[in-house]
């Protein structure tokens, strides 16, 4: 196993059925790492994308990782970094930078099973990837607060959460704000969103856990 450097964990992800758990380590020369279970049952830390390669493609400070399949992942982070990792389960994964058309920090990413992807970040930034070299800019976002996480169930059922209790939903046509009662005057920062199946969404954040039992 490789000797893991000092630093704190950023984004992390293991796709269903994957043999490796990917995660980022924040440090001066950031890198992407993988955990693999050895034959003895222990977990070994192995470099996935080296610090040298990360400095080239922009994966030095990654805040979120997600992929619909074990072998293809998206990683997003500071200064609008969007990096696609291919052959993620193989001996020599590859990383390629894509243009997100923003320098805002991207805090969350989610890839749909159709190879579409969504990324969210600072000041209401949302980006949509549908192929090619560029992520599309979403201009009709109904908020300008920082968005921290995104999750979805299909290309027409995507959720995002952020500062000031903001919850957004995409129905395949447009993003809309979801009204949530009972949060009080001090609207909490929401940092994570996930759901086991369409129609049931969990949201967590600053002193609060929300269960949304149905679509807006």
Image (tube, rainbow, N blue to C red):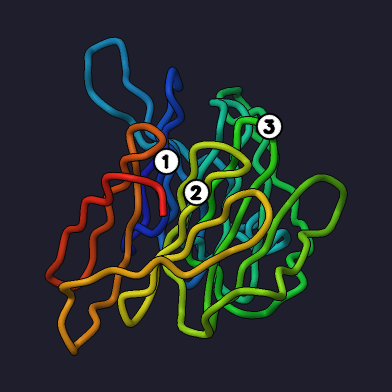
Q: Secondary structure at mark 1?
A: strand
Q: Are marks 2 and 1 in contact (CB under 8 Å)?
A: yes
Sequence order check: which comes first, mark 2 or mark 1? 1
**For the point 67% across and 79% down, which residue is it?**
103
Residue 154 place in picture, x, y as percent: 57, 37
Q: Are marks 1 and 3 in contact (CB under 8 Å)?
A: no
Q: Is residue 159 left or right of residue 98?
A: left
**For the point 22% across and 51% down, which residue is it?**
211
Of circles 3 and 2, which is in front? 3
Mark 1 surroundings within 10 Å by alpha-carbon count, few (fewer than 14), some (14 through 19), many (20 or more): many
Position of the N terminus by quadrant: top left
Residue beneath disc 1:
13
Residue 98 place in picture, x, y as percent: 77, 57
Residue beneath disc 3:
114
Number of numbered discs: 3
Residue 3 place in picture, x, y as percent: 36, 44
Q: Is residue 35 above or below residue 160?
A: above
Q: Which of 84 and 24 lies nearest the eye of the viewer?
A: 84
Mark 2 surroundings within 10 Å by alpha-carbon count, few (fewer than 14), some (14 through 19), many (20 or more): many
Sequence order check: which comes first, mark 1 or mark 3? 1
User: Looking at the rendering, which quadrant does residue 163 occupy?
Assistant: bottom left
Residue beneath disc 2:
65
Distance between the Cα atoms at labels 2 and 1? 6 Å
């Amino acid at each position: 196993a490789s000797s893991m450097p000092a630093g704190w964990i950023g984004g992390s992800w293991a796709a269903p059925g994957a043999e490796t758990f990917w995660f980022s380590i924040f440090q001066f020369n950031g890198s992407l790492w993988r955990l693999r279970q050895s034959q003895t049952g222990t977990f070994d830390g192995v470099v996935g994308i080296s610090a040298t390669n990360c400095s080239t493609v922009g994966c030095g400070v990654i805040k979120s990782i997600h992929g619909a399949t074990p072998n293809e992942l998206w990683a997003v982070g500071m200064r609008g970094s969007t990096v696609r990792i291919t052959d993620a389960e193989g001996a020599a994964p590859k990383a390629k930078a894509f243009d997100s058309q923003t320098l805002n920090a991207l805090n969350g990413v989610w890839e749909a099973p159709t190879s579409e992807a969504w990324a969210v970040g600072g000041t209401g930034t949302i980006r949509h990837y549908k192929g090619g070299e560029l992520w599309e800019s979403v201009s009709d976002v109904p908020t300008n607060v920082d968005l921290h996480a995104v999750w979805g169930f299909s290309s027409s059922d995507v959720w995002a959460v952020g500062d000031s209790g903001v919850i957004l939903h995409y129905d395949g046509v447009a993003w809309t704000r979801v009204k949530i009662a009972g949060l009080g005057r001090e609207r909490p920062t929401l940092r994570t969103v996930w759901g086991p199946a369409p129609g049931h969404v969990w949201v967590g954040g600053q002193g609060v856990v929300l269960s949304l039992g149905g679509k807006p």
